[in-house]
């Protein structure tokens, strides 16, 4: 029955089948793996311990004949007296007239409902025609869709347990069951649906938490191994003395963290295996200089480098930064969508002829007409903004180039080893010497006038400021400030000497570029903007940021925004204007004022928002775990990762027949092929 269609189950017709399909339940066996998303635990208490209006469970004898009265259209009210110890409790059942015959005088029943301590009355919503026992005290709760009722779904699951549980195959080798004291797969499935008690439920959940995390980590390690096996790249031979001389000539000293990360990258460049590395670094931690050194080393080996970024503004900033660092040594060109005609053609010819050492650009780098002479290193900045196929297209333009992904979004360790388990990960976890942390304050909107004066004071000292807003124009749905209104208000309250600009996502690329250039040149002192500046220009003279309705943003986004100030030597400030109603909103504001450490913030953000929303569901790279939660189960995640690494290193998938089922599950997963290099 396991592989039979669900419509072979009695009372499952076309409509019910359609609703089950919406839950990804197509076969009878799928019902067994549609696990409850939570459990309601019923606890038997003494009446004197119950609080008014709480949901309570009581046990007692039926002490009166049930009485039914009808009202409205097909509505009923059934009442009877339940003797609980020495107390007579009135039990009220709405629209449950069918229970009349089950409430038998003198028999013990267990009832759950809303307790009214003043009337000694229980409004019942759950009825058990027997004494309280632990098994019936655990109520599984399932996700349903459409018109499918929970009672129907539970009935179908009971059918699947009786007809198909014996067909559930064990996929874990026996030593895991023994070493970790895990129940068999069949027993764990049964206990998740029909737990005998809280202990057996706990062990069943533990079994599937490990299974899900272990299988996923095996897939990550499998991808990593296959990519390394296929990633015979080009060993880069470069003059180490010239490279070290360049590093020594930099106007600043690399931090200990930068040196360690650079050693990892240079080792990858020299190695014949193609690099597939993620570089994490907080805003302002110095990722760009590491990228510049890697590009310089690549050029010394006679190969080209490419740096792809998500926006034109960021591409221009990187091109300017690289020219400042490398312009005397290397030929650097910029290629974006707005570079057209003869100028574009000339750049493409230089790239194809090998006259360009480093090409910086946006998606223009992966167009068909962009042909490299000898591409040796691809660096993708803010990599989570690009799709897998876009990154793959650029990578495939070279002769097995090394690939370095960079992100300024600090990723918690749990997400890092889950989402990027198939990559090497390097982290810059310290800031350059002399960098002052941004002082962050949370204020209510009733302090708006004081904030306006603070902006005026800062700007009149020769500095510049950002004001960030969530929306462009007024919204009927959301009672929050918007960029257009705030821009007009600030233009009215600022002295004539202060120029106010407005930037948002609806401006053309050229309009944004002109605005940012004016701001960078201090022709605009106060820039009102939506979040388009989240990743963008570097203006060291901008020392103040005010974020309206800050509770509308997640911690990661607030941190990215705050990273636009504090890039010079002056003390910088970030003011969060917010009147959060929810506890989560208040918590975000509190955390932002207490730390500027992006990795610490990312852990808070993960705990508040959960793993599915950290990157956004489409880009997270995370599977939909049915039982495991990588935040709550991080210890199991670490164990699963260590076990998966050991399995791959020892070649158990191929050598040990006990791993045959795991091997089949891994190799038959279509998502595996998307992440393996061609």
Image (cartoon, rainbow, N blue to C red):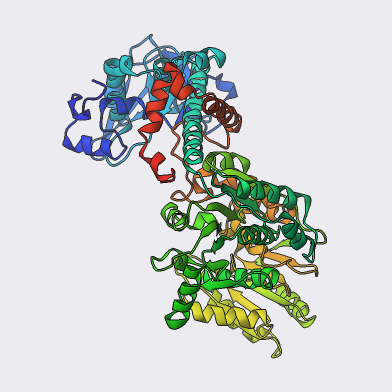
Q: From the image, which quarter does the N terminus lie in?
A: top left
Number of numbered labels in the structure image: 0
Residue ranking furthest to the bottom: 496
Q: Nearer the viewer, residue 43 or 454?
A: 454
Name the side, left or right, on which 12 lies relative to 652.
left
Residue ranking furthest to the top: 106
Name the side, left or right, on which 342 lies relative to 263.
left
- Who's the residue at 58% across and 47% down the image? 277
- Residue 634 is situated, as x and y percent measured from the top left of the image, at 59, 33
Residue 92: tell me if it is visible. Answer: no
Q: Nearer the viewer, residue 70 or 432?
A: 432
Q: Looking at the picture, does residue 494 appear above or below residue 65?
A: below
Q: Looking at the picture, does residue 521 appear above or below residue 232?
A: below
- Who's the residue at 59% across and 39% down the image? 414
Q: Nearer the viewer, residue 452 or 124?
A: 452
Q: Looking at the picture, does residue 124 appear above or below residue 503?
A: above
Q: Quadrant of residue 393?
A: bottom left
Name the side, left or right, on which 327 lies relative to 200.
right
Residue 464: tell me if it is visible. Answer: yes
- Residue 149 is situated, as x and y percent measured from the top left of the image, at 30, 34
- Residue 470 is situated, as x and y percent measured from the top left of the image, at 54, 67
- Residue 226 is situated, as x and y percent measured from the top left of the image, at 46, 37
Q: Quadrant of residue 536?
A: bottom right
């Amino acid at each position: 029955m396991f592989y039979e269609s669900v419509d072979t189950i009695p009372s499952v017709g076309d409509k019910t089948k359609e609703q089950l399909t919406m839950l990804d339940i197509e076969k009878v066996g799928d019902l067994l793996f549609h696990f409850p998303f939570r459990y309601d635990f019923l606890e038997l208490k003494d009446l004197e311990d119950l609080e008014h209006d709480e949901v309570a469970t009581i046990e007692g004898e039926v002490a009166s004949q049930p009485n039914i009265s009808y009202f409205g259209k097909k509505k009923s009210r059934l009442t009877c007296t339940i003797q609980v110890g020495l107390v007579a409790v009135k039990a009220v059942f709405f629209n449950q007239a069918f229970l009349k015959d089950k409430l038998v005088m003198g028999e013990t029943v267990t009832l759950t409902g809303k307790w009214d301590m003043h009337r000694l009355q229980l409004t019942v919503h759950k009825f058990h025609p027997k004494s309280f026992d632990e098994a019936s005290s655990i109520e599984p709760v399932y996700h349903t869709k459409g018109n499918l009722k929970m009672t129907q779904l539970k009935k179908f699951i009971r059918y699947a347990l009786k007809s198909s549980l014996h067909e559930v195959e064990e996929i874990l080798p026996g030593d895991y069951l023994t070493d970790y004291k895990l129940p068999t797969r069949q027993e764990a499935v049964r206990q998740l649906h029909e737990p005998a008690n809280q202990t057996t439920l706990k062990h069943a959940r533990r079994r599937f938490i490990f299974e899900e995390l272990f299988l996923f980590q095996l897939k990550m390690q499998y991808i990593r191994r296959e990519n390394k096996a296929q990633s015979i790249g080009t060993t880069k031979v470069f003059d180490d003395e010239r490279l070290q001389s360049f590093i020594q000539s930099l106007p600043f000293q690399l931090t200990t963290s930068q040196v360690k990360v650079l050693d990892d990258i240079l080792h990858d460049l020299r190695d014949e295996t193609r690099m597939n590395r993620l570089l994490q670094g907080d805003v302002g931690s110095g990722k760009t200089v590491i990228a510049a050194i890697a590009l310089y080393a690549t050029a010394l080996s006679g190969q080209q480098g490419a740096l792809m970024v998500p926006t034109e503004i960021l591409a221009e900033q990187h091109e300017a930064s690289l020219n400042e660092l490398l312009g005397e040594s290397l030929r650097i060109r910029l290629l974006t969508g707005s570079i057209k005609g003869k100028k574009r053609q000339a750049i493409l010819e230089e790239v194809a002829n090998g006259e360009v050492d480093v090409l910086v650009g946006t998606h223009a780098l992966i167009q068909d007409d962009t042909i490299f002479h000898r591409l040796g290193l691809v660096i993708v900045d803010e990599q989570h903004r690009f799709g897998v196929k876009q990154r793959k297209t650029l990578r495939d333009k070279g002769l097995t180039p090394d690939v370095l992904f960079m992100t300024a979004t600090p990723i918690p360790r749990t997400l890092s080893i889950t989402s990027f388990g198939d990559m090497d990960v390097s982290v810059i976890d310290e800031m350059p010497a002399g960098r002052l942390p941004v002082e962050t304050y949370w204020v209510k909107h009733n302090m708006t006038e004081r904030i306006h004066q603070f902006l005026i004071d800062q700007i009149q000292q020769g500095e510049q400021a950002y004001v960030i807003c969530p929306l462009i124009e007024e919204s009927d749905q959301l009672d929050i400030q918007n960029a257009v209104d705030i821009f007009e208000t600030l233009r009215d309250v600022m002295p004539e000497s202060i120029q106010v600009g407005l930037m948002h996502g609806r401006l053309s690329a050229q309009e944004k570029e002109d605005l940012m250039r004016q701001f960078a040149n201090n022709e605009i002192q106060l820039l009102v903007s939506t979040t388009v500046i989240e990743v963008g220009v570097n203006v060291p003279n901008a020392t103040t940021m005010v974020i309206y309705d800050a509770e509308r943003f997640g911690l990661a986004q607030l941190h990215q925004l705050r990273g636009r100030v504090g890039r010079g030597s002056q003390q910088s400030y970030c003011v969060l204007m917010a009147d959060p109603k929810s506890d989560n909103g208040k918590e975000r504001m509190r955390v932002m004022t207490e730390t500027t450490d992006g990795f610490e913030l990312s852990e808070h953000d993960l705990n508040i928002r959960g793993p599915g929303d950290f990157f956004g569901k489409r880009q997270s790279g995370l599977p939909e775990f049915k039982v495991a939660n990588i935040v709550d189960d991080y210890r199991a995640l670490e164990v699963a990762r260590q076990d998966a690494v050991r399995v791959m290193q020892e070649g158990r998938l191929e050598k040990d027949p006990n791993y045959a089922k795991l091997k089949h599950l891994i190799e038959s997963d279509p998502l595996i092929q998307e992440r393996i290099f061609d």
